[in-house]
Image: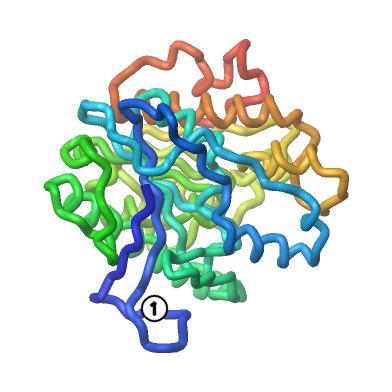
């Protein structure tokens, strides 16, 4: 289900109109059934048009994929761990659908968050599409400020989930809540993960909100006070050989020294920055060449490795389940592309 959330306690720093901060969120959860329901598109129509415009018409002839999710189906009974997901800079909350749907199939609720102006294309229920505009990428101070906005977004989303869980309706238009969904969020077992700047947001929200019990950063440089303060809860860093973040990144080594909870650093072999996202599976199906950092890892291997790593980490730290796949130690025969770096 989609939620349009308005945080009236904050002014949007980038809209230029003095308006409250607005967010678009998707809550993906295990359904009771989906019989007779149409699967949703990967992007809504307005956002899809904006994404294609970003590539100057090169993608106009292509239909983007459908998902395995349907809209507002009745929720299956049960109390479920909750994961917040923040996308990369200029990326959309749908860009990790292949991992999100896998997590939900194993019993998680995953809440994906678009950060308007910092994300790529954000479509609101009234048809408005807010596209990316530069939100501070000139220096570390500007990046830290942008990540702090994302962390505040995630905290507000958590507040709204608590309202929904109690039977309230935080949606700005009071659109109906799916039957059975209130009461299914186990917010005492909340985690956060993200790709690129979204990974930095996962670390930042953990720094300021103890409700988030574990976090995971997929190839994102971290910014802000968390770099020096560190974290006292489990955190996983995952990079690529191209980036080698523990040696080359300006902030990962400092954060690493200050991680006081269970920590782990893994690497996705033969990968590049976007190999962690759905883009790695979509681009090989196109008959156009796009200059995107995808590496040489096969798409099916990249998707399987990302799914397995994220699930094993949160299973271990939110559910207390052992990592029987051994992916978290980089010793999995099923996922040989995942390599151990440090821990």
Question: Can the viewer see residue 148?
Answer: no
Q: Determine if residue 46 is in view.
A: yes
Q: Is residue 22 above or below residue 255?
A: below
Estimate the x, y position of residue 293 in percent, counting from the top left: 75, 48
The number of callouts visible is 1
Residue at the image position 37 percent from the left and 15 percent from the top? 322
Q: Position of residue 108 (x, y in %)?
A: 35, 31
Q: Residue at x 43, y 31 (%)?
A: 36
Instruction: State the image coordinates of residue 53 (x, y, percent, origin top left).
Output: 72, 66
Image quarter for residue 13?
Answer: bottom left
Foreground residue among 165 and 57: 57
Label 1, residues with CA under 10 Å away: few <14, some 14-19, many ≥20: some
User: In the image, is 280 to the left or to the right of 257?
Assistant: right
Residue 1 as seen in the image, left or right of residue 136:
left
Name the outermost residue toward the bottom. Answer: 17
* Identity of the residue furthest to the left in this view: 166
Q: Is residue 102 left or right of residue 333?
A: left
Q: Position of residue 332 (x, y in %)?
A: 58, 14
For the point 41% across and 27% down, the residue is: 35
Q: Is residue 335 above or below residue 306?
A: above
Q: Tell me: residue 248, above or below residue 4.
A: above
Closest to the observer, 86 or 177: 177
Q: In the shown orientation, is residue 166 left or right of residue 342?
A: left
Res. 209 image quadrant: bottom left
Of residue 58 and residue 237, the one placed in the foreground of this image is 58
The residue under the point 49% across, 69% down is 127
Q: Tag 1's secondary structure?
A: loop
Residue tagged 1: 12
């Amino acid at each position: 289900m989609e939620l349009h959330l308005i945080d009236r306690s904050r002014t949007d720093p980038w809209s230029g109109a003095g308006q409250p901060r607005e967010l678009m969120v998707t809550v993906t959860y295990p359904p009771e059934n989906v019989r007779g329901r149409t699967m949703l598109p990967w992007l809504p129509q307005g956002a899809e048009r904006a994404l294609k415009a970003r590539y100057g018409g090169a993608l106009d002839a292509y239909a983007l994929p459908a998902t395995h999710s349907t809209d507002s189906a009745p929720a299956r009974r049960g109390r479920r761990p909750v994961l917040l997901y923040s996308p990369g800079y200029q990326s959309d909350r749908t860009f990790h659908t292949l991992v999100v749907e896998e997590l939900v199939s194993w019993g998680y609720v995953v809440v994906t968050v678009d950060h308007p102006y910092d994300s790529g294309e954000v479509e609101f229920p009234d048809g408005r599409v807010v596209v990316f505009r530069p939100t501070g990428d000139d220096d570390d101070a500007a990046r830290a400020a942008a990540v702090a906005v994302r962390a505040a977004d995630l905290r507000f989303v958590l507040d709204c989930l608590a309202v929904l869980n109690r039977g309230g309706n935080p949606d700005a238009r009071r659109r109906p809540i799916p039957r059975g969904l209130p009461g299914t969020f186990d917010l005492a077992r909340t985690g956060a993960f993200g790709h690129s700047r979204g990974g930095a947001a996962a670390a930042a929200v953990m720094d300021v909100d103890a409700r988030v019990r574990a976090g995971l950063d997929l190839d994102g440089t971290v910014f802000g006070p968390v770099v020096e303060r560190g974290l006292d809860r489990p955190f996983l860093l995952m990079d690529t050989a191209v980036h080698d973040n523990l040696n080359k990144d300006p902030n990962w080594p400092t954060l690493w020294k200050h991680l006081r909870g269970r920590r782990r650093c893994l690497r996705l072999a033969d990968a590049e920055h976007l190999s962690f996202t759905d883009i790695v599976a979509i681009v090989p199906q196109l008959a156009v060449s796009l200059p995107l950092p995808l590496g040489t890892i096969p798409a099916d291997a990249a998707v399987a490795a990302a799914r397995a790593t994220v699930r094993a980490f949160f299973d271990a730290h939110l559910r207390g389940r052992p990592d029987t796949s051994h992916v978290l130690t980089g010793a999995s025969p099923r996922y040989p592309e995942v390599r151990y770096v440090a821990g």
